[in-house]
DNA sequence: CCTACCGATCGGTAGG
DNA sequence: CCTACCGATCGGTAGG
């Protein structure tokens, strides 16, 4: 009896994408060959093409998967009845949580998106910009409501997002604090210092 | 009369390194070919090798140049008679200033160092770790002296350094604030929120 | 600084 | 899923 497929997407395709995320993180997108990937998966390079269309397709899947998850969460938070500060904290917490649990995928989306080919590259840039602007709008709303110090919102967004992507350093360090402690400290530094 | 050399290092070599920094930032180290670089410089690929030994050497020069400049500044600040908070602010200001004025070089050192070959890779990792530990020690000193909130110092370092490297987003954005405003806002968010 | 060229490796395809 | 193979491009060298 063949294994039962529990996902709409082929399991083998997901294995390939997962291994690719790891290799792209370690050796970069351009620095990883399809032979490297095939070896990690345990097949010959030519066999990969029964599951994926091209190397470029793998990058597209990884980048847009991450972008969509973060955007979905942002949209849910925006319509909540919470203070601006609570919304911002929730978004940062989700970002950190998602980063820790999908480390390789998020790293690829953060660092390798420049290698997307058109029209995906332009599309990705638009989504990225949109996300940042909406997060900045949340901060500006907090400033207007006197919940947050008067700072430049785009700069605050820049700091928050890059601080989170910097968790890769934490991920690799030997003397890790727990992910709960990390999250708590990041919220203190990134948000509570801004509260009035 | 030939042009007078004002630097110990050949001017042409510096041109090559400068163009390489730009290309490595745009297309990544592995994604930039020696033919791309030659075209940017205005010579044939083979001619580059009269000035540099290898592609790897260019990356080594870029990474260690940035690392040494930052380390030199840190060492000067450490022996100053200033409060811990003042020292940390000074280091962040220098980092931001250096990032803005040497954008491509710092980007390459930040993002492409993984492609260094041994023994340079190990050496670079040690320097990087050393720098972070000494910056963390400064923060811990500030905590002990009750100048700074009780937070996890390595997490604060992680946030600060990655926030600064995130200036690349600012660098590319259309609606830039001035570099002075950026610096001021980053200090407010990264340091003043931590002060007691 | 150039022309000419090297072996190695790249992403990907044909055909079974 | 494999073997066999494609044209293109890679970093780098020889020789002038």
Image (tube, coloured by chain):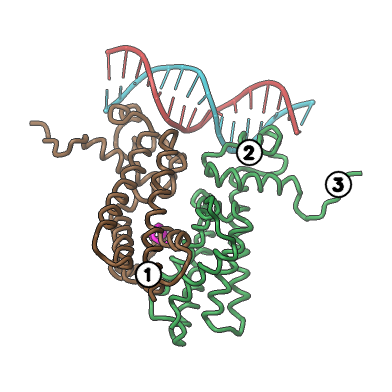
Chain colours: A brown, B green, C red, D cyan
Q: Which residues are magenta?
A: A163-167
Residue labelled with disc 1: A191
Does the magenta-highlighted stretch encompass residue B173?
Answer: no
Of residue A126 and residue A93, the one placed in the foreground of this image is A126
Above or below residue A53? Residue A151 is: below
Residue labelled with disc 2: B37
Secondary structure beneath label 1: helix
Residue B118 visible to an observer of this rendering: no
Residue that protrudes farthest toward the left in the picture: A1
Q: Looking at the image, do the residues carrying marks 3 and 2 touch, with CB atoms under 8 Å apart?
A: no
**Image spot of residue A150 (x, y percent):** 45, 70
Q: Chain of mark 2?
A: B
**Image spot of residue B178 (x, y percent):** 59, 61
**Image spot of residue B164 (x, y percent):** 51, 62
Residue at 61% from the left image edge and 48% from the top image edge: B21
Residue that protrudes farthest toward the right in the picture: B1
Q: Whole-Å distance between the Cαs marked 3 and 1?
A: 55 Å
Q: Quadrant of residue B40?
A: top right
Q: Chain of mark 3?
A: B
Residue labelled with disc 3: B3
User: Label 3 crowding class (10 Å Cα cut-off): few <14, some 14-19, many 20+?
Assistant: few
User: Label 2 crowding class (10 Å Cα cut-off): few <14, some 14-19, many 20+?
Assistant: many
Q: Are marks 1 and 2 on the same chain?
A: no
Secondary structure beneath label 2: helix
């Amino acid at each position: 009896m063949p294994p039962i497929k529990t996902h709409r997407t082929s399991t083998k395709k997901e294995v390939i994408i997962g291994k690719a995320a790891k290799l792209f993180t370690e050796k970069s997108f351009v620095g990883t060959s399809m032979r490297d990937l095939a070896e990690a998966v345990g097949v010959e390079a030519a066999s990969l093409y029964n599951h994926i269309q091209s190397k470029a397709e793998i990058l597209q899947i990884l980048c847009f998967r991450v972008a969509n998850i973060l955007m979905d969460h942002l949209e849910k938070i925006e319509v909540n009845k919470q203070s601006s500060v609570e919304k911002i904290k929730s978004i940062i917490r989700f970002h950190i949580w998602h980063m820790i649990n999908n480390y390789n995928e998020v790293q690829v989306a953060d660092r390798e998106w420049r290698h997307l080919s058109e029209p995906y590259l332009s599309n990705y840039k638009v989504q990225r910009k949109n996300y940042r602007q909406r997060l900045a709008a949340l901060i500006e709303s907090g400033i207007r409501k006197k919940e947050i110090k008067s700072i430049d919102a785009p700069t605050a967004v820049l700091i928050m997002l890059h601080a989170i992507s910097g968790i890769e350093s934490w991920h690799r360090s030997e003397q890790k604090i727990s992910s709960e402690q990390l999250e708590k400290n990041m919220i203190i530094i990134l948000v509570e210092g801004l509260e009035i």
